[in-house]
Image: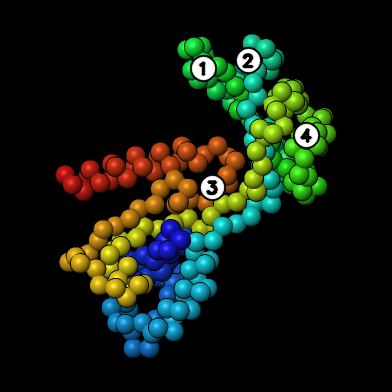
Amino acid sequence: RKAYGGLVGQGRILTGAYAIGNSTGPLDLPQSKGENQSGDADRSQTTRQHWAISNQAEATSTQDRHYDVFRGNAPVTRQQVEGLEKSFQTWGEGRNMRFATVPMAYPGQNGNKEERQVWFITIDDETISAEKDPIKRRDMLLDAFEDWHDPICTLVKATPPHEILMERALAHRHSQQPVLDFYGLVNSVHKKPVPVTGNGPAIQFVGDAFMCVDPILAQGFTVGMEGAASLAIALTACLE
């Protein structure tokens, strides 16, 4: 995606939901003098360099969602803690505060089933994210969410502080159109001949490489599977 993701079709450069026809989007490669509408004529090196520096960076850029994500696996079972009969997600009213949890069961040692409660917290608070001590950082999370309903704080308290992961919430700024002629694109960008004839292959991005879904909406894996399934159906129809 970083190297080729912004180029679509006959050298056209598009991102997001822009059409692949004659219409243009803000990230399209401008036509050089003497170039026809089909894009067959050579574009100037200056134009390509400008796009490589500015528009390519924009086409493949990420966006800060303005909060941090803290993730943990609480070593408790649904029988031990009340309120875990169902998975849930709770949203706050400020500072991008959210909490969600789902159960996870897996084979443990000696074949016994182990259970954990997978959870995440989000919050926009630089004092928490800047804290290097994992024990103090967990305590600060508990203070921030102390008024939230059970069993939120119970799960956070049950999780060893050094096992709580922290990451900045980032997402792609633009969704990604397919690359329709990859070998031609490689030849165009790197100025190296490709030992093949004809057009293709086509590259269709799916999952996180394609979309710009917020990273904690619990949608990424499902949307990725749906995209792969839809692609398989479309390819089958074409082959038949």
Q: Residue under circle 2?
A: 78
For the N terminus, the quadrant is: bottom left
Q: Amino acid at mark 1?
A: Gly
Q: Are marks 1 and 2 in contact (CB under 8 Å)?
A: no
Q: Which residue is found at the position 38% from the left and 85% from the top?
A: 44
Which of the two discs, 3 and 2, labels the residue nearer the N terminus?
Answer: 2
Q: Residue under circle 1?
A: 108
Q: Amino acid at mark 3?
A: Val
The picture quadrant where one finds residue 165 is top right
Task: Give the image's coloring scheme.
Answer: rainbow
The picture quadrant where one finds residue 82 is top right
Q: Which mark is residue 213?
A: 3
Instruction: Tell me the element at label 3.
Output: loop
Which of the two discs, 1 and 2, labels the residue nearer the N terminus?
Answer: 2
Image coords of residue 225 (percent x, y): 40, 38
For the C terminus, the quadrant is: top left
